[in-house]
Image (spheres, coloured by chain):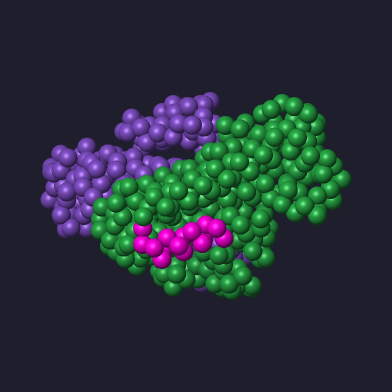
Chain colours: A green, B purple
Amino acid sequence: MEAQLQKVVYTIQPYPELLSMLTYHMGWQGEGAGPEAQGKRIRPILVLLSAAAVGGNWRAALPAAASVELLHNFSLIHDDIQDQSEVRRGRPTVWKKWGVAQAINAGDLMFTLAQQAILELGTSANPGVGLEGARILNHTCVALTEGQYLDMANEQARSLPLSDYWPMVGGKTAALLSACAELGGLAAGGSETQRMALRTFGWSLGLAFQVLDDWLGIWGNADKIGKSTSSDLVTGKKTLPVVYALAQGGAFARRWLSGPVSAEEVGEVAAMLAAEGAEAYTLAEAERLTRQSREALDSLEGEAEACAALRELADGLLQRQA
Amino acid sequence: MEAQLQKVVYTIQPYPELLSMLTYHMGWQGEGAGPEAQGKRIRPILVLLSAAAVGGNWRAALPAAASVELLHNFSLIHDDIQDQSEVRRGRPTVWKKWGVAQAINAGDLMFTLAQQAILELGTSANPGVGLEGARILNHTCVALTEGQYLDMANEQARSLPLSDYWPMVGGKTAALLSACAELGGLAAGGSETQRMALRTFGWSLGLAFQVLDDWLGIWGNADKIGKSTSSDLVTGKKTLPVVYALAQGGAFARRWLSGPVSAEEVGEVAAMLAAEGAEAYTLAEAERLTRQSREALDSLEGEAEACAALRELADGLLQRQA
């Protein structure tokens, strides 16, 4: 996988410093380079396993696998500028090293490389598959920018309408995982039914992951409740339990809207959330989405070994800290 | 043309404010909207005339025409952030109105819409044309980001190697004009030979335009020489005459590298440039490139009326202030 990614990125030869912004961000070069700096490459693995799951040639899906990882990393380069994050995977972010202007441009180039990679499906599979792959990728990009817009637009506000929560996490997390699974199926010649099952699998998996992450951010580390400063309740993050309880307009909503929650209040405010049904709602949603993703995978009736590996990947993501 | 562009942009429905960033930038909505705020749409016109020139159906090229204009506008949104430009076509820039973070995201969405538009060639023409069109577009995007990189990387320096001048203006101006002409020929079913002629036509036209613009920035307004504060010599722009004379390492180079040129010195410094052959070189390059673009157009032996219109468009661009 790393070889396929590097093939795409190293095609741009002439300007060593421009190239080095990309290879630095990918974790291949510069100070602190190495596996730790590269992320887990979950998205390309999801593409390749999905290709194998429909019984096709997973090698035909390699361009799609490279493309989704490049797209993910493009979005991280721009996200870090937007959030003013100075550190990513333990290293200074691209904008911190090269400035905002060059980092925007490096992100644009990474975005372009993702587009070029997906078009290679036109060769590794056939022209119709290349076109359809590019359509899926760009449909995902629209969702990504919509999710990012919603996230930033609501950053100043203390609340978020429940109706904006799903498109926000859908755009920021689920859309790309959904595209990964569908692109794998597409590249390996899966049927329309199989592609739809994979799309649903990836989408539900992405939402389930995010909802569980929201639960973990409040109740995940029980022995720390009451003293944690890293609780999502202290940082003010608009997680599903918070958004749900705000929509109820009860005691929690009044407390939340009156101002920041201190580390000392975390236990008490978490209890308010639970009392108003927000924890039960969140866990029920996580369970519903997890079930939905498993059912989609089962309905695929795909190649047994690859499906087992997909299930394992999904379970690993969903149980990581539970 | 405006209708085709609006069709692409207005497909993204859900978030009025995100949509309004795009429609504002395109000059369709918001304060100061109207033809003045929309630019001249030269690139889509070039696409459509090129399609007609190969004797094909220009309507098949409409998706490509929309795509190049969206791509151009995506690059303007990001350029304005990178250059910290507060005004574009007489109105506040997108980042000035919505902030840097939202403007980066709006640019990313505009980029995505350009990609989606070009893929429509897969329907308006055929899948192979759609794929090839997307390849041409993304090849151009690589050149654009390389040109932008070179421009920004040399911003602090007082000089620019002559070897970096051509890829810089090639990437920033000629690559997209070249793609416009080629995409028109591709969409309308032109032969490989015709496409190559159109590509050369657009590329030479873009370079000729930039070189003439460089000449105009120093010698364009003879009655103002000696008192103009807007001269490229005062702003320190790395134009072709300057880059050429710097490579000579003579009196001009010593003067230029010693510090900024004041408005009073403009006449004297321009005379140094001319004495060292920089004006003659620049005009010779402009003439060579203009001839090259005319020859490429003649070699096309295309549909007479469309070729005449292309020649008129080119002449208009090249003679605009001469």
Question: Which range is magenta?
Answer: A302-316
The residue depicted at 69 percent of the width and 27 percent of the height is A248
Magenta stretch, main secondary structure, is: helix
Residue drawn at the location 45% of the way across and 69% of the way down: A1
Q: Position of residue B176 (x, y in %)?
A: 36, 51
Q: Residue at x 53, y 45 (%)?
A: A289
Task: Find residue A61 and report its image quarter.
Answer: bottom left
Residue B69 in the image: above or below residue B258: above
> In the image, what residue occupies the spot 18% across and 58% down?
B192
- Percent of width and height locating residue B223: 47, 43
In the displayed structure image, the side of residue A200 where residue A189 appears, left or right: left
Q: Nearer the viewer, residue B108 or A132?
A: A132
The correct choice, above or below, for A57 with respect to A150 in the image is below
**Occupied quadrant, residue A319:** bottom right
Can you see residue B168? Answer: no
Q: Quadrant of residue B204?
A: bottom left
Q: Is residue B178 magenta?
A: no
Up the image or down, A287 lies above or below A321; here it is above
Whether residue A244 can be seen here: yes
Q: Is residue B244 left or right of residue B257?
A: left
Q: Nearer the viewer, residue B62 or A285?
A: A285
Image coordinates for residue A118, horizontal then vertical, percent: 37, 57
Q: How many marks?
A: 0
Q: Quadrant of the C terminus of chain B?
A: top left
Q: Where does the image place residue B44, in percent across and percent down from the top left?
A: 31, 41
Where the N terminus of chain B falls, by quadrant?
A: top left
